[in-house]
């Protein structure tokens, strides 16, 4: 099968041939139809995160068809999705308390386990989702990380939060904006300074206001979600949130947060981070996505152009989500 390999951090992925993997007990073999390109993939390739074993096949927003199953609850022909969370131990305190996302022995698709930038992949059946026909393969792929982990971040804001700031308006933000609008909330989208095309995209999607991080938001926010991996946004977001509000960091990786005056945090403001996702997050979000008929803006690439997709993501040239079509 064809696959894209990470052989060395900081280097482009290499397209090559490898044997189709064989599923072991508890796993399913999937013919990959599409795989979303996530900023976490970029962090892995660029070396922002500790380097995985190499060669490694990245990609963790996988949509495909079961071609071989070793478990009774999946069978050939079913459409499935594979997310970032690929394995947990099931026996630690975190797993036993519904916080499997914090499991110290967790393994992640496309990082600890080979992922979906390939024609086939294997996955632990316990961490796969059956998908209905509500969305196309290309549209559902970004939901499996940008959507699911973004939804976990969104859920950390209070249900009473009516004015939300989204810092960074990429794949996750354009998905969660639709959830917020469905719940009659106002979203203020913050982008890189002078990124007028993304600001216009946010307004077209329904944002109440959109501007650069160097501009003042014309409202006091109830909560903010930082989707961009830029630590310097933390004091900016805190200054925009009212007393008692919350700032949620939604990324797997973020650059260092600069020091800021205590007064930005004072007033019972809170900071929280999101780590990974749980299967319950995924199941709930897929139901929400179907209920509101969520749509994703997608730019598709062939597997041979995976490095172009990563470069476009790196330079902020994608509005919505990038997806590899196999």
Image: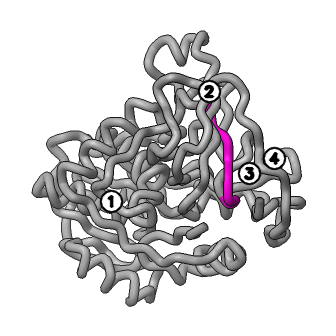
> Which of 131/86 is in front?
131
Disc 1 crowd rating (10 Å Cα; few below 14, some 14-19, many 20+) is some
Q: Which residue is mark 2?
A: 70
- Residue at 24 percent across and 61 percent down: it is 178
Q: Is residue 254 visible?
A: no
Q: Which residues are magenta?
A: 117-124
Query: Judging from the image, what secondary structure is the residue with disc 3 in?
Result: loop
Spatial CA span between label 3 and label 2: 33 Å
Q: Which residue is mark 1?
A: 135
Q: Is residue 204 above or below residue 279?
A: below
The image quadrant where one finds the C terminus is: bottom right
Q: Earlier in the sequence, mark 4 or mark 1?
A: 4
**Circle number at residue 49:** 3
Mark 3 or 4: the one toward you? 4
Q: Residue 166's image quarter?
A: bottom left
The image quadrant where one finds the N terminus is: bottom right
Q: Is residue 275 above or below residue 135?
A: above
How are the residues colored?
one colour
Disc 3 crowd rating (10 Å Cα; few below 14, some 14-19, many 20+) is some
Q: Is residue 211 above or below residue 41?
A: below
Q: Earlier in the sequence, mark 3 or mark 2?
A: 3
């Amino acid at each position: 099968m064809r696959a894209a390999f990470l052989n060395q951090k900081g280097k482009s992925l290499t397209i090559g041939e490898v044997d189709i993997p064989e599923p072991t007990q508890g796993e399913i073999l999937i013919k990959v139809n599409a795989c979303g390109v996530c900023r976490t993939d970029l962090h892995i390739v660029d070396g922002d995160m500790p380097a995985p074993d190499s060669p490694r096949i990245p990609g963790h927003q996988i949509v495909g068809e079961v071609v071989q199953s070793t478990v009774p609850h999946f069978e050939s022909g079913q459409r499935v999705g594979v997310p970032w969370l690929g394995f947990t131990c099931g026996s630690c305190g975190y797993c036993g308390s519904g916080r499997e996302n914090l499991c110290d022995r967790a393994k992640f698709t496309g990082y600890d386990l080979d992922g979906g930038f390939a024609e086939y992949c294997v996955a632990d059946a316990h961490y796969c989702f059956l998908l209905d026909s509500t969305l196309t393969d290309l549209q559902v792929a970004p939901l499996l990380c940008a959507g699911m982990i973004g939804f976990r971040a969104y859920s950390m804001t209070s249900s009473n939060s009516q004015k939300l700031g989204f810092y960074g308006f990429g794949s996750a933000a354009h998905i969660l904006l639709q959830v917020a609008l469905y719940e009659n909330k106002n979203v203020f989208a913050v982008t890189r300074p002078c990124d007028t095309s993304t600001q216009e995209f946010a307004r077209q999607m329904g944002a109440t206001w959109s501007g650069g991080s160097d501009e003042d938001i014309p409202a006091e926010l109830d909560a903010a979600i930082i989707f961009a991996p830029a630590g310097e946004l933390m004091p900016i977001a805190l200054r925009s949130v009212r007393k008692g509000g919350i700032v949620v960091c939604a990324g797997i990786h973020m650059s260092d947060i600069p020091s800021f005056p205590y007064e930005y945090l004072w007033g019972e403001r809170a900071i929280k981070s999101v780590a990974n996702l749980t299967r319950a997050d995924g199941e709930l979000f897929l139901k929400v996505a179907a209920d509101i008929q969520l749509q994703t803006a997608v730019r598709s690439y062939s597997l041979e152009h995976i490095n172009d997709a990563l470069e476009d993501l790196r330079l902020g040239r994608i509005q919505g989500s990038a997806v590899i079509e196999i």
